[in-house]
Amino acid sequence: MNDTLNLLIGLAMGFNLLALGTSRLPVLIRAVAVQGVLLGLLPLVLEAHALDWRLILITLATVAGKGFLIPYMLIRAMRAANIARELEPFIGYIPSLLLGAGGTIAAVALTGYLPLLPEHAGNLHVPGAMALILTGFILLIGRTKAISQVCGYLILENGIYLAGLLLIRSTPILVEFGILLDVTVGIFVIGIIVDRIQRAFDSLDTRKLTALHE
Amino acid sequence: MNAYLLILIPLAGAVLAALWPHRRTRPFFLPAVAFAHTALCVLLLARPVAVDPSSWLAFDPLARAILPGVSLLFLLCACYAVGYLRLKEQDNRVFVPALLLVLGLLSAGHQARHLGILWIATEAVTLACVPLIHFNGTPRSFEATWKYLLVGGTGIALSLLGSICLGYASLHGGGSGDITFTALLAHGPNLSRAWVLTAWVLLLVGYGTKMGLAPMHTWKPDAYGESPGIVGALLAGGVTSVAFMALLRIKSVVDAAGEGVVASRTLLAIGLFSTLVAALFLLRTRDFKRMLAYSSIEHMGILCIATSLGGPGAWAALFHVWSNGLTKGALFLSAGNLQRAADSSSIDDARGMFKVMPRSSMLLVTGMFAITACPPFAPFFSELLVVRTGFAAGQGWAIGLFLACLLLAFFGLSRIVFAVVDGRPRLRTTKRARVRESAGLVLPPLFLLAASFWLGLFTPDILRDAWSAAVLQLFPTP
């Protein structure tokens, strides 16, 4: 079980670096989508011995939402706005990559010092979650296009979802389902807003949102 | 059952309002549903029901101490909305159901006794407010909505992470990972300390963003400034109170885990910082609706300072939730009237409003004195209680700084309010078609101010009992 788990999470962490290093929005969106699918499969790996229909439903919903529905909406928003690149990020690509890589190494190193249960100690579960959350924040802060920021938010959500999987055995699954639904709706609304911003400002550049200040 | 009714009535009202075919009559759903909600709340306030400790949603003492106040605020805002929406040409097919949805979700959030349910309710309230904030449909309101979503969304994400950490604290301490507050409290000292502290930081940042504590307050001036006054009133008096309720419940778990001192200290620090930041920005801003946002940040800071002072402080905080919600509601509604008449909320354009809208101007001035803690309105009494509790708890320096911030805030608020009310109106304002000050737009803020007055001078015993019972739930062993 640990090998498959490490493989999936390790791959997802690799897509972090791809997301940090690219200037092309289609690549960024697809990296986030593949990462979502990889993480969406995790419940099946974690609970391989106790599969039931609720678990399978959750897996399906996660994979469909994170892997297909949201990326599809983002690609539509991107085409509508007619932009494909993030040209002037606040934090450049090489610095973001270095930050992300450094953060990932730090997360792996730090995990040894965290008070963890034995079943969570020897794998990439916790460091993976920390690296994803960090990557999400770097993208949220360091990019100027609304779509890149939404992708950053998605990676942040992926990280939190991964952290939530630590509790999959103990917390009633009903709550998790509600959480999943909420997150999807949240992004959905953000997508609509992106659409609106584009109509109002003819660009997805959040730097132009500067009318409101002291 | 009653707990569910408080949630289901508004939700059913929202569905009906969304299906209702007539734009002119749809707003009447708001007062109808709000009245039923308030009546039920008052009934439950008068006759508290026994709470099953393992239930996920219940009208427990904490909900009893705050929810009726929120319900009263919503009722008066709903009455105002009828007159307000009559003036507007926009379609209200989304606005009215979204308002009712907010009421239902606020009731769920206040009554949530399960960390996950609490989070879902807060997240859903955040999303339900989105169409309310960009109701005016201007580019500025889009900008405000985008910032609200991005900052609020991040805060909500962090509070989920914090909830997961708290669940893990229980799991690591040998518990079953049950995240109802009852189970977490019972587990108390066995919770893993390191994870409880991590959870506290994340939850404070997460729910603090929803409350609008500095430095996570950046969305607040934009959202309050660009949304209709009625939405500002509900955000400042309702949505923030859910986030505060969340922090109260979580703090009681942190106390039970034996880290209460750390939690109190962080609350005191963040509360003082919020009041200071708000006071300084109040001296700078030139927009009277953004002014209300900074005033709201200041009062959220006061709530945190009060909560950090232990049991008597928490009592004062619950009192202050009521007094701040009602008074702030009056301010937002009257400020909304003035903004419509001047077609601007900047003191550069809105001047001499007393000549244009005398009643709303009077309400704004009186509300300003009420919110800056002038007697005999409720904020004076609740803040006095905070100050006395602070001195009794030996936090003299903190209270000194707090009083200095209140003074600065008074300078800032009075500067803006008198700039708006005094003087001669601009030609542009007087030339515009006169907006009549109809009773529907003046009576609700007047009632809110009257409620604040009544709450200050004649605090009913039933509320005192409700607050004491809530404090007893928060601090079982004094």
Image (cartoon, coloured by chain):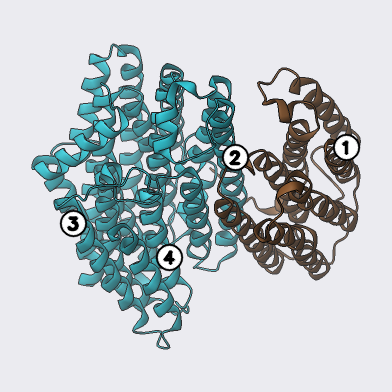
Chain colours: A brown, B cyan
Q: Position of residue B469 (x, y in %)?
A: 21, 37
Which comes before the other along the chain, label 4 or label 3? 3
Mark 1 or 4: the one toward you: 1
**What amino acid is labelled 2 in the image?**
Leu
Crowding at mark 1 (Cα within 10 Å: few <14, some 14-19, many 20+): few
Q: Is residue B452 above or below residue B349?
A: above
Crowding at mark 3 (Cα within 10 Å: few <14, some 14-19, many 20+): some
Q: Position of residue B211 (x, y in %)?
A: 45, 42
Question: What residue did someone put label 2 on?
Answer: B158
Q: Position of residue A155 (x, y in %)?
A: 75, 46
Cα–Cα gap, marks 4 and 3: 20 Å
Cα–Cα gap, marks 1 and 4: 46 Å
The label on residue A3 is 1
Cα–Cα gap, marks 3 and 1: 58 Å
Chain of the residue that carries numbered disc 1 in the rendered image: A
Q: Is residue B10 above or below residue B335?
A: below
Q: Residue furthest front?
A: A49
In this rendering, do the residues under marks 2 and 1 share a single chain? no
Tell me the element at label 1: helix
